[in-house]
Amino acid sequence: MIHAILSPESGCTAQLHCADRIFTAVIGTSGVTLHKREGDHATPAGTLLLRKVFYRADRIKRPEIGAAGPGGHCLSLEPISPRDGWCDDVEHADYNRQITLPHPARHELLWRDDHLYDIVVVLGYNDDPIIPGRGSAIFLHLQSPDRRPTEGCIALTEADLRNVLARGLVSIDVQPAG
């Protein structure tokens, strides 16, 4: 069971301290915030539990998931389908939930043309309870090749994301900029 600390550096870069390793991460364009709002492009501060792992089985090898919880329970791991999405419509009852497409509300596709969600981990943010407008679709996913900032997620290289999952990462403590 591994807990990591994410420390913002400058702009949209951060360091993820995980056990004995430090990984370079990319975060939201607006940095880290204590007051997350939908569409603000900021990464929320606080402790984010890893909830579920998705991956593109048609593109990549299944990620190895280490024992993550008491008794050695592993995170749920499942392939992404072209019908998978995530609702980001603050007016809809499915806000900040996984959905099946087609769906009438505004949403994000989990099955993407780029490779950012070839491995994507749902982070526990604004999900217990869900508060409309407080932010949705906060994930741990792959970095873009040019290390472009995220819209509020945390992004690692594929090798680094595989590494932290194999170690049994269970949470990330996102530190406010300071």
Image (spheres, rainbow, N blue to C red):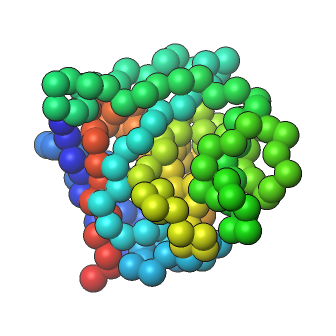
Residue 109 sits in quarter: top right
Query: Residue 24, percent across and down?
Result: 36, 53
Query: Residue 161, percent across and down?
Result: 40, 37
Quarter occupied by the N terminus: top left
Q: Residue at x 80, y 56 (%)?
A: 105
Give the camera-side residue of 138 and 17: 138
Q: Residue at x 52, y 62 (%)?
A: 130
Quarter occupied by the C terminus: bottom left
Whether 43 is drawn above or below 65: the answer is below
Residue 173 in sight: yes
Left or right placement of residue 3 versus residue 65 in this view? left
Residue 28 in sight: no
Query: Residue 82, percent across and down?
Result: 76, 30
Residue 168 sits in quarter: top left
Whether 139 is drawn above or below 27: the answer is above
Left or right placement of residue 130 versus residue 91 in this view? left
Residue 88 sits in quarter: bottom right
Number of residue marks:
0
Whether 38 is drawn above or below 172: the answer is below
Query: Residue 16, percent across and down?
Result: 30, 54
Q: Residue at x 47, y 33 (%)?
A: 53
Left or right placement of residue 52 versus residue 117 in this view? left
Q: Residue at x 53, y 24 (%)?
A: 78
Whether 8 is drawn above or below 50: the answer is below
